[in-house]
Each structure stands twice: as structure tokens, then as C-alpha cells.
Image (tube, rainbow, N blue to C red):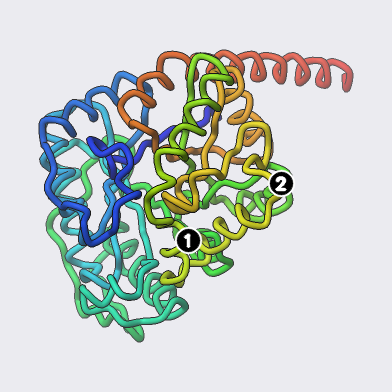
């Protein structure tokens, strides 16, 4: 199976968005700039674009519908917080987007990681309660997507009686959207195994992940990495630019550290701790943590030339990682460079490995006769 690649639309047009205080981030956006990025993603081999949710951003469902009307191939991974909308209304939104875009929509379920922001939306549940509610939310959503009659559900957080939706999910490939769930905790893993096609988690070294990934993939759920990327024609140029970026951020507040003190997200806290306890900014020759104190845990990054980045991705594939969600600095340049210089190397090596596996299989078959 070929590795799939996704990209975050969250900071397109704002290279170092996360270096700013959250209250200063603007929710306005340039539709022209984002449309240009979507079309570039289509040409760069990107499967879908993450449409993040938060008070500093436009509504992801509405924006996805607008961008979907201006594009032909790219899919939109619409983020949803179960505490904000009812599962019935959410399915109705996603089904409508599917009808407008011929099924070009995934969903990314986030339980929330900022208690103070969650309260902006009237959500005051704690970390574990949010996971319990998300379990109920997805149970209802999946019941609607099965379309096997009226939906009835009696839970702690949702009570649905004789539920019906006359707008179906529209796709020539699937009867429901692919479901992605993010998190590094055991609760996130269990929820993904029960409901999701893929679990998103922040990157770590292959050595640290090797024993954990098979416990998830063996139960039919894929595992993908949320990781930034800084790729240049050579490793030397990539390292130079990474260090220069950190120097440019040195005068700013250390957002990553400050956010970790406010969040109840295990993923954000554990990734910052991973960076702080290491003797080096390099967890591997290509996995870099230098920007995390300034830009937060999503800034853990693959850094290097095309050969190093391709080799790193294939090393992750070897341990069971099958999808990647990238963010870059700046995103458009990083994505087009990735599509032009890195992705062909990955596809060539995947083809070589598949061919070698077929040869080994034939030898085994003949040897068994």
C-alpha cells in the first residue's frame, strides 16, 4: 500500500502563524490564496487538506464547501469538535459537502485541547469526558451513514429519537467519509480503533514507535503522523534554514512552552517533554525538535534533503505508518518542493520494494512445490 500524504491549510499565507499570541491571530483569510494552494496541492500528489477548527479560523465546513467548488481533485479533511454541534447536524453538513464535491471530504475528529477555548463554545467537559462524548458522537454519526433505518440512540451526552436524514453521503467510492482521530493517549488509541480509519499522532523516532504501532494496525486502524517538514535541495541547506528560523523566533514568546501549561492534551504535553528531555534537538538525523518551544508540538519536523526525507518516510512506513499530515514553512513552497523532489523518490522506492516482494513471493511458492 502506498503512503498517503495530506497537508494542513491552517497557516497558508502566514508562515509562522503559531509564533503569534493566539488572541492576535486573525480569522480572516484570502480565498484567492487558499484556492491557489488547493490547486497546487492537486498537482503535488496531496490527498487532502486539513481544515482546522478554532476561534482564530473560519468555519471549516463552510470554507471546504467554498474551496470544493473551485477545485476538481483535492479532498477536504473537515475538523469537528463534538461539543460544538449535534451529530445529526454534523452528518448533514458533511453529506452536503459530499454532494457539492462528489465525495471529496474526510473528517478529522478532535476532542479539544484548550479548556479555556472550549468554554468559548459552551463546552466545559474535562479531558476524559470529552473522549466519552466523542465515542457517543461517532456512534450516532456512523448509524446515520449506515442508512439502515431510523436512528435511535440513548447515551449520556446524546439522545436521538427516530432520527432521519434525507441528504445521503454522495461518493462513487464510499458510503461514508474516512474518519481520522488525533491524539497520543490510550483513550485516543481506543477511540480510533473503535471508530476511525486512521489515528493521527505527533511524530516520534521510529525506535520509540516501533512497538506501539502494530497494536493499533493489527486491529484494522491505520496510524499516521502529524509532522512539519523543512526540505531543501541539500541537508546542509535544510539545517541552515531550520537554525535561521529558530534564531528569528528567539525574540518572541515561547508559545509552545506556554501553551503546554494551559492545555490538557497529552499529545501536546508529551511531545514538548520529548523535546525538553533530549540532549539534542535531533531525535534522529532527520527528526528535529528545535522549533517546538516557539511554535508548539506540531512543529516537530522532518528536516533534510530529498533523499533524507524520502528515507525517513520509508523508515516510518516499515514500522507501520501509512499516512502523513504535513505543515511547512512556508506551506506552498514546501508542498510544491515535496511534490516535485521528494514524492517521486518515495514512489520509485515503493515500486522497487513491491517488485522485490513479488520476486520473494514467487521464490517461496516455487520452493514449496
201 in relation to 245, above or below: below
Q: Secondary structure at mark 1?
A: helix
Residue 369 image position (x, y, % from top left): 88, 19
On the rendered image, what quadrant is the N terminus found in?
A: top right
Q: Cα distance, mark 1 to mark 2?
A: 27 Å
Residue depicted at 38% across the width and 26% down the height: 334
- Report the residue marked by disc 1: 257
Count of marks overlaid on the render: 2
Pick whichever of labels 1 and 2 is earlier in the sequence.
2
280 in relation to 172, above or below: below
Res. 29 image quadrant? top left
Closer to us: 194 or 50: 50
Residue 180 image position (x, y, % from top left): 41, 52
Residue 139 image position (x, y, % from top left): 37, 68
Q: Residues within 10 Å of mark 2 (few under 14, many from 20)?
A: some
Residue 213 visible in the snapshot: yes
Q: Do labels 1 and 2 touch, CB within 8 Å?
A: no
Instruction: State left or right for residue 247 relative to residue 162.
Output: right
Q: Secondary structure at mark 2?
A: loop
* Disc sitting over residue 210 in the figure: 2
| Foreground: disc 1 or disc 2 | 1
Residue depicted at 55% across the width and 38% down the height: 322
* Disc sitting over residue 288 in the figure: none
Res. 182 image quadrant? bottom left
Residue 225 visible in the snapshot: no
Residue depicted at 26% across the width and 56% down the height: 53
Instruction: State left or right for residue 295 relative to residue 213.
Output: left
Amino acid at each position: 500500500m502506498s503512503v498517503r500524504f495530506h497537508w494542513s491549510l491552517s497557516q497558508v499565507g502566514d508562515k509562522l502563524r503559531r509564533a503569534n499570541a493566539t488572541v492576535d491571530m486573525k480569522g480572516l483569510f484570502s480565498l484567492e490564496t487558499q484556492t491557489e494552494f488547493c490547486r497546487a496541492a492537486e498537482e503535488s500528489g496531496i490527498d487532502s487538506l486539513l481544515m482546522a477548527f478554532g476561534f482564530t479560523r473560519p468555519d471549516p465546513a463552510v470554507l471546504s464547501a467554498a474551496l470544493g467548488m473551485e477545485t476538481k481533485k483535492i479532498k477536504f479533511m473537515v475538523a469537528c469538535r463534538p461539543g460544538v454541534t449535534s451529530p445529526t447536524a454534523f452528518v448533514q453538513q458533511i453529506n452536503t459537502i459530499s454532494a457539492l464535491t462528489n465525495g471529496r471530504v474526510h473528517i478529522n475528529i478532535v476532542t479539544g485541547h484548550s479548556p479555556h477555548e472550549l468554554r468559548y463554545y459552551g463546552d466545559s467537559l474535562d479531558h476524559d469526558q470529552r473522549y466519552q462524548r466523542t465515542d457517543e458522537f461517532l456512534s450516532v454519526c456512523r448509524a446515520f451513514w449506515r442508512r439502515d433505518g431510523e436512528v435511535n440512540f440513548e447515551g449520556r451526552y446524546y439522545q436521538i429519537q427516530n432520527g432521519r436524514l434525507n441528504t445521503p453521503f454522495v461518493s462513487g467510492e464510499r458510503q461514508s467519509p474516512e474518519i481520522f482521530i488525533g491524539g497520543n493517549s490510550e483513550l485516543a488509541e481506543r477511540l480510533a480503533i473503535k471508530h476511525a480509519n486512521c489515528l493521527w499522532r505527533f511524530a516520534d523516532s521510529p525506535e520509540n514507535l516501533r512497538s506501539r504501532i502494530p497494536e493499533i494496525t493489527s486491529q484494522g486502524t491505520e496510524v499516521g503522523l502529524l509532522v512539519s517538514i523543512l526540505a531543501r535541495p541539500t541537508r546542509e541547506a535544510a539545517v541552515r534554514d531550520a537554525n535561521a528560523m529558530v534564531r528569528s523566533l528567539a525574540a518572541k514568546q515561547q508559545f509552545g512552552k506556554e501553551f503546554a501549561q494551559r492545555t490538557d492534551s497529552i499529545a501536546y504535553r508529551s511531545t514538548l517533554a520529548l523535546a525538553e528531555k533530549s540532549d539534542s534537538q535531533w531525535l534522529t538525523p532527520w527528526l528535529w525538535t528545535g522549533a517546538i518551544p516557539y511554535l508548539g508540538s506540531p512543529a516537530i519536523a522532518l528536516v533534510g534533503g530529498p533523499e533524507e526525507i524520502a528515507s525517513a518516510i520509508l523508515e516510518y512506513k516499515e514500522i507501520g505508518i501509512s499516512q502523513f499530515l504535513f505543515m511547512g514553512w512556508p506551506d506552498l513552497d514546501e508542498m510544491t518542493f515535496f511534490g516535485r523532489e521528494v514524492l517521486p523518490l518515495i514512489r520509485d522506492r515503493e515500486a522497487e520494494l513491491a517488485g522485490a516482494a513479488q520476486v520473494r513471493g514467487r521464490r517461496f511458492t516455487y520452493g514449496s512445490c
